[in-house]
Image: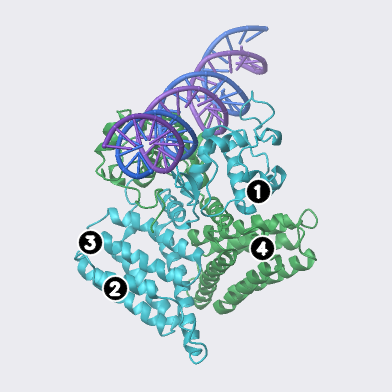
Chain colours: A green, B cyan, C blue, D purple
Amino acid sequence: MVGPRGLTTVGPTDPRHCPPQLTALNIVEEDTLSETSVTALDSGRAWETVLRRIEGYLVAGVLGPGDHLPSERALAAELGVGRSSVREALRVLEVLGLIRTQTGSGPQSGAIIIARPSGGMAALVRLQVAAHGFAVPDVVATRIVLESAVMTALAEASAAAAGDAGDAASAASGPDLAAATELLDAMENPAGGPLTRDEFLTLDQAFHLALAVASGNEVIASMMAGLRDSIESYVRVGASSLPSWNDTSARLEREHRALVAAIEAGDASLARDRIRAHIETYHAETKVSSIHSPSH
Amino acid sequence: MVGPRGLTTVGPTDPRHCPPQLTALNIVEEDTLSETSVTALDSGRAWETVLRRIEGYLVAGVLGPGDHLPSERALAAELGVGRSSVREALRVLEVLGLIRTQTGSGPQSGAIIIARPSGGMAALVRLQVAAHGFAVPDVVATRIVLESAVMTALAEASAAAAGDAGDAASAASGPDLAAATELLDAMENPAGGPLTRDEFLTLDQAFHLALAVASGNEVIASMMAGLRDSIESYVRVGASSLPSWNDTSARLEREHRALVAAIEAGDASLARDRIRAHIETYHAETKVSSIHSPSH
DNA sequence: TCTGCTACTGTGGTCGGACCACGTGGTCTG
DNA sequence: CAGACCACGTGGTCCGACCACAGTAGCAGA
């Protein structure tokens, strides 16, 4: 019932055992592994060992965003596993959006830790949709739930700021919607002529993401982005489906302005209704649900 | 950026090179698959090619839950890449919860597609938390958002069913809370003596998951489970922190019953308030936020 | 004939080596 | 001193080999 077999069942094992340093750990592998308090947990596959070790480094604070991971060869030697196993673990971390790899030498080369959740989230949701693990309507519904929460948070923050108007003029200006409104301006008055459909969708995505970021919850923001991207990747292949893209984009712009207005007015309920209608009509138009129609 | 391997022919993506093995899978042609992905078809990395191919199979319906993937060696030969690259792609799919691998031979061996999102979600969130990409309070807040949505859906469904009482007695019984209540019974009257802390937490997790599943949204359910598991894995290592686990578990049981009562009463607002309090107090007690205190 | 054991086959898991393309940085040459 | 140059280390990839495992076919014995 729980999980297949992966690292889902158990957690990060024990983070407190983490070694003091990355280097100088060239001891024999057996020693390090068997001495860790958790013995019952069969380390099983070698790549899981690598994954746990790196997670241990992260939890212990030995590694953080911006830091370089040890080289694949060094990691392999340190853990007593083959480079292939190390690479499998790094591949996972890369897809999950934790690291970025680059060839060559110098400060930008190697595997660098970059906590960037949105990419991994999008990949996860997209593949789950492809494998029929997620139904598209459920994905859309979840996106509505999350964006509604964002709207609520923003509108309430705005209302609270308006209420405290006479209090402190410093941080009482409500949520920071500057980034979002700038994107709106860019959508309405594009610098380089009329926007293509893809360009518009990119800005649209950025707008929604900006609102989520403004609400202050990174988790919701990246989940939102992941949900949207996963669907979007299927929408865009169906490309020229809409009869009149100009009309649609104009309507979307109008709805975006209305969203911001509802937020600034501090009307959480209105903002929720508008974001729900915004998302629902969009997905109704592009009717993505026809993805899995053939042969299944 | 072009050839990962200089010597071998023109490239791995040469359509002509695909040997006619994998009978059922050759239905999908090259062009059909390569166009489906979001990124450019080239993409350089061999393992991405494998990933896209498998995703193409999934989207096209050639592969579905329960099906076997081609063997690693066959996949490598089909795509003209090395087995290492295939393995990296499969590793990603495994962590993302799309496939389950097993050694040996027979119907259960090999890589089998199982769309089980919760595992991948948990791994993603957990690692992002470890890498400081996610803040624990945000994770908790997001969980509250999602579970609140579940409560709302369940309560409203229950209320609607009560309203239609005189109508059809067949499916008008509201959401199916049988699984959830059974878990509650198991928690209060454990078969094998008093529950350990881990056993209780497992049942608790299953209860919350059962509610989410009952609400009918798999996406929310797996995200919820992932968020909870990711935090839980850190909570459990801090193990014996609570002064009186008996009191806590008794309180949690009471709150669980109250949740179900609110749902069955059709009181969405009350259910939301209760789930929020339930989650907040739990996390306040276990104070997981002390994870990243040292050395950062 | 039926039963039980034993090889065989194919799977994923892992390892080590080899090579490539790429950049950096120190070194050699003009 | 300046510019070209090459060694070095990185990730990316492929290959061949071996292992453990689990079915299965086939053989040997009762």
Determine the secondary structure under disc 1: loop
Q: Which residue is mark 1?
A: B37
**Quadrant of image for the N terminus of chain B:** top right
Front residue (pair A264, B13): B13
Question: Do the numbered discs 1 and 2 sit on residues whose CB atoms are within 8 Å?
Answer: no
Residue A54 seen in render: yes
Q: Which residue is mark 2?
A: B185
Q: Which amino acid does the dot numbered 4 rest on?
A: Val
Q: Which amino acid does the dot numbered 2 rest on?
A: Asp
Subunit bearing disc 1 = B
- State the CA–CA distance, disc 1 to disc 4: 15 Å
Q: Are marks 1 and 2 on the same chain?
A: yes
Measuring from the top left, give residue A68's x and y in whole percent: 46, 36
Q: Is residue A157 left or right of residue A256?
A: left
Does residue C29 lie above or below B172 as drawn?
A: above
Measuring from the top left, give residue A269's x and y in whole percent: 56, 79
Q: Which amino acid does the dot numbered 3 rest on?
A: Thr
Q: Which amino acid does the dot numbered 1 rest on?
A: Ser
Q: Which mark is residue A84?
A: none
Q: Which residue is mark 4?
A: A288
Q: Which mark is residue B196?
A: 3
Front residue (pair B273, B168): B168
Of the residues under marks 2 and 3, which one precedes in the sequence?
Answer: 2
Subunit bearing disc 2 = B
